[in-house]
Structure formats: structure tokens, C-alpha cells
């Protein structure tokens, strides 16, 4: 029985640039293309269902597996930027509900045996510029950047913080921050206690507010 690709649809006249078809199967590679004048839409028909990509059992014993790879590559010089992935869930005006999360990273180890020879990381942010080149970067370079845009007219029952550490389940954290060494630029080996005290970082532990003292350089 053949697969039904299109039902009761007329292909638009403005096909993708170069006259390529909307669906192309070359050997074992399937390529889907939106028409030139529109986005490419993938939607479920029921609100309780999601779009699942590569949600399957991986049976290879050797070699790494990547479920989804997104690698747009800018090949035209100019002033435009590029974003690899944009996630922006929302509640429309006058609509309420429960949690609102942009990204949930949840690596899972099922109960039982099976050793992990390397690390377990929920989110890894690497900046890879190589080791050569002559580019000029005018703005900051950061692994994480956060911008808070919330109105003062809302009522907030909880705290508004850059980072939250939830209560642990069974085993606690060994430390707050793990640095490979002191020579990475993220820390120094010298004592700053003799320097002028300047600003503090506010930390809530439960409902109690504490301060971490900062020192002028």
C-alpha cells in the first residue's frame, strides 16, 4: 500500500526556488521543503499530543548517537544574525494555567545496572571559535545570557532569581560550583580580603536572605 503524501491538496505555484519538489526521496534520504514564500509547519491535531523526533530505542552498542542535529550555516556575508533554535511558549492575553517552561532538560537513568563511563550533563554550553582567525567581536561573549522583562504590576508570590537550586531528592550536591583549576580566568588564587568591600550577591536559603561579599579589584 503506497504512502499517502497529500490529500485533497493542490500544490502551490510558487514551489521552492530552483523548481525542487515539496517532497524529495533520493535513495534513502527524504527531504521536505516548504514553498518559497512560506514557512514549514509541523502541527499536531490534538492538544494532548506532541511532535516526536527520533524517540526510539538506540540499539547500536558502539559509537555515539545524536537524536537531533540543527546546524544552520550562514554562507552569505552581511549584517544579519543567525539563531540555531528559538523556543518561545506563551499564554495568550487573559489566559491562565500552570507551569510555563521554555526548555526542560531531563537526562534519565532508569533504575538498575549499567555504568556510565563519562559524565552526565543536563545542559552543555560550549563556545567554539577554533584556535585561529582575525575576527573582531564587538559585543560580549558569554555561555549564558539572561534578560529579565517582567512588569511591576504583576503579583509575585515567589522570588524572582537568575538561578534556582531546587530541594534535592535522596543525595545532595557536593558543591555549588566545580572549577577544573584556578587558572581558567574564572577564579584567582590571591586573597582579596585587604581590598575594598564593594557590593554583595544576594542569596536566599529558604526564606532567609544572605549576602556574599564582593571586593574591588
Image (cartoon, grey):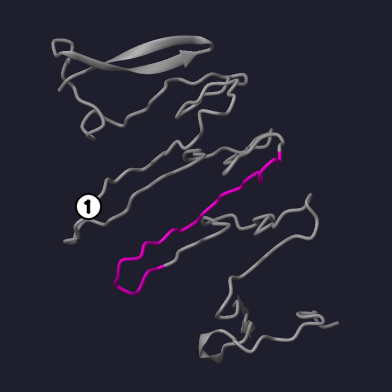
Residue 153, given in percent of the width and then of the height, sits at: 55, 28
Residue 210, given in percent of the width and then of the height, sits at: 40, 10
Within the image, what quadrant is residue 5 found in?
Answer: bottom right
In the displayed structure, 119 sits above or below 52; it is above
The front one of 123 and 116 is 123
Left or right: where 213 falls relative to 64: left
Magenta highlight on residue 80: yes
Q: What secondary structure is the magenta-colored segment mainly?
A: loop
Residue at the image position 66 percent from the left and 35 percent from the top: 99
Residue 180, given in percent of the width and then of the height, sits at: 31, 32
* Residue extending farthest right: 1
Within the image, what quadrant is residue 192 found in?
Answer: top left
Magenta highlight on residue 215: no
Within the image, what quadrant is residue 50 found in?
Answer: bottom right
Residue at the image position 51 percent from the left and 61 percent from the top: 69
Left or right: where 62 falls relative to 112: left
Left or right: where 194 falls relative to 24: left
Quadrant that contains the C terminus: top left
The front one of 142 and 125 is 142
Mark 1 neighbour density, 10 Å: few (under 14) some (14–19) many (20 or more)? few
Query: Which residue does the numbered mark 1 point to in the structure image?
Result: 138
The front one of 117 and 54 is 54
The front one of 155 and 2 is 155
In the displayed structure, 174 sits above or below 52; it is above
Numbered disc total: 1
Quadrant that contains the N terminus: bottom right
Task: Give the extent of the magenta segment.
Answer: 73-95
Residue 110, given in percent of the width and then of the height, sits at: 68, 37
Residue at the image position 58 percent from the left and 23 percent from the top: 156
In the displayed structure, 70 sits above or below 163; it is below
Amino acid at each position: 500500500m503506497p504512502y499517502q503524501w497529500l490529500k485533497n491538496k493542490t500544490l502551490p505555484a510558487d514551489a521552492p526556488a530552483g523548481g525542487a519538489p515539496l517532497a524529495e526521496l533520493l535513495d534513502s534520504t527524504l527531504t521536505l521543503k516548504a514553498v518559497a514564500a512560506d514557512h514549514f509547519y509541523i502541527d499536531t491535531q490534538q492538544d494532548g499530543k506532541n511532535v516526536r523526533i527520533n524517540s526510539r530505542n538506540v540499539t547500536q552498542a558502539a559509537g555515539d548517537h545524536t537524536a537531533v542535529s540543527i546546524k544552520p550555516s550562514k554562507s552569505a556575508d552581511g549584517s544579519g544574525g543567525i539563531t540555531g533554535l528559538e523556543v518561545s511558549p506563551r499564554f495568550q492575553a487573559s489566559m491562565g494555567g500552570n507551569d510555563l517552561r521554555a526548555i526542560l532538560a531531563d537526562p534519565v537513568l532508569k533504575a538498575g545496572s549499567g555504568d556510565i563511563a563519562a559524565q552526565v550533563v543536563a545542559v552543555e554550553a560550549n563556545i567554539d571559535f577554533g584556535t585561529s582567525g582575525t575576527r573582531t567581536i564587538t559585543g560580549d561573549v558569554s555561555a549564558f545570557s539572561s534578560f529579565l522583562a517582567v512588569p511591576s504590576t504583576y503579583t509575585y508570590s515567589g522570588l524572582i532569581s537568575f538561578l534556582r537550586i531546587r530541594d534535592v531528592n535522596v543525595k545532595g550536591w557536593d558543591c555549588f560550583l566545580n572549577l577544573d583549576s584556578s587558572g581558567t580566568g574564572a577564579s584567582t588564587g590571591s586573597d582579596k580580603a585587604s581590598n575594598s568591600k564593594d557590593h554583595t550577591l544576594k542569596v536566599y536559603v529558604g526564606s532567609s536572605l544572605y549576602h556574599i561579599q564582593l571586593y574591588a579589584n
